[in-house]
Image: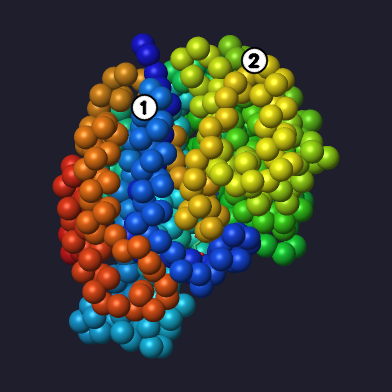
Amino acid sequence: MKSYEVNFDGLVGPTHNYGGLSYGNVASQSNSQQSSNPREAALQGLAKMKALMEMGFVQGVLAPQERPDLAGLRALGFSGTDAQVIEKAAKDAMPLLVASCSASSMWVANAATVSPSADTADGRVHFTAANLNCKYHRSIEHPTTSRVLGAMFANQQHFAHHAALPAVAQFGDEGAANHTRFCHDYGQPGVEFFVFGRSAFDTRYPAPQKYPARQTLEASQAVARLHGLSEEGVVYAQQNPAIIDQGVFHNDVIAVGNGEVLFYHEDAFLNTEHLLAELHDKLGRRGGRFKAICVPRAEVTVEDAVRSYLFNSQLLSRADGSMLLIVPEECRTNERVWQYLQRLLADEGPVAEVNVFDLKQSMQNGGGPACLRLRVALNETELAAVNQGVIMTAPLYGTLTQWVEKHYRDRMSESDLADPALLIECRTALDELSQILKLGAVYPFQIN
Ligand code: SUG
């Protein structure tokens, strides 16, 4: 049976703004307080989805969330009418209002961890929503994420959904951004590679000194257990704590994998030789030939990687077996990175083409091409069982573009977040969107 890796891209929400909310994420910190353009952000994302669809990839879309998060503000003690809640939060606790307005759910590489049916004990595709509990603005995503994923993958015969792990730092889980799957073919059993930043319970593992390690070993192990993965199909590795302190807040900022290939920076991991050997052996036992492409620090520094997001690229398999790398514009403007990419192409390795996309609006908050997509490997039967309302088509692209143009503002700064009209605008837009994508009622304002 034919199988596919489907990329579900997060549609950028109408409140996209630069809140400076992510300590340890250099772009988020350095662009704090700048004015953003939500309309442009959403259109940039949609342009990437359309381009991939036109190249022949199956492309899906993942809906944004209700923001400002009124229910969250009420839970924090703000009361009165909706407008009064926003007004009081703006007056007394602006940072909380900003956090409650973040459109961060667009980075769907953090929405969940997904294990394809070929890897799981019960032969279903498993999803665990990420608790994202390192930052308040992200920790509020998972209840709606779970409902949206449930509405997209609604068939219980094929899809199993797990709630987010306990909401404590010891089980900090950032989803697919720290998870890579290697395989010979998407439909065959593969090897799932979990990268963690620290251990919560075992003090033998080192930890970063400055910035938080968002993913724990214990969270990764819990996800693997929930999904029913076998030991032969799992490899755990620790991210190098020194690079977390340089702004590598997720593994997908320093490594990307697809099929049999791992593309990574020399400084990405601890015990690199050991983990490469384990990946090689385990993939070998599953009929695959592991290939590692190491980018030496002498050619691209960690700082270059963080600035350009070279590794936050999408590595995609084309019909002829060669691979395509989707990189952000910032890779072209960084001379060393661009030269490296020219050498990579000249090498005649697996990567045969590099495509550049302008995703500046998302990049300025630390989210490149790979952050914007959640990969779900599906066989033909499973793909047919997905809610077809979320699969990108030319008409859907047209409808979503018009929807963005109708509802989104082209400027958003802190003072705009305090405008009670923004809430009404967002709810109107999302109500329409949930009908366009055939999701049913998934938003707090629709179900409470
Ligand atoms: O969690 N930025 C996100 C970026 C997530 C990128 N995802 C992956 N690497 N997979 C984060 O740090 C910034 C929001 C703000 O500052 O307004 C933010 O949440």
**At label 1, which amino acid type do we have?**
Glu
Q: Nearer the viewer, residue 281 or 144?
A: 144
Q: Nearer the viewer, residue 175 or 49?
A: 49
| Residue 297 drawn at (x, y percent) | 80, 41
| Residue 317 drawn at (x, y percent) | 51, 22
Asked if residue 97 is positioned above or below residue 177 in the image, the reply reads below
Left of 250 or right of it: where is 384?
Answer: left
Q: Residue at x 41, y 25 (%)?
A: 55
Label annotation for residue 54: 1
| Residue 409 drawn at (x, y percent) | 31, 64
Answer whether residue 270 is visible to the viewer in this image.
Answer: no
Label 2 or label 1, whichever lies nearer to me, is 1
Kindly identify which residue carries mark 2: 289
The outermost residue toward the right is: 298
- Distance from Cα at disc 2 to Cα at disc 1: 30 Å
Callout count: 2
Asked if residue 69 is positioned above or below residue 267 in the image, the reply reads below
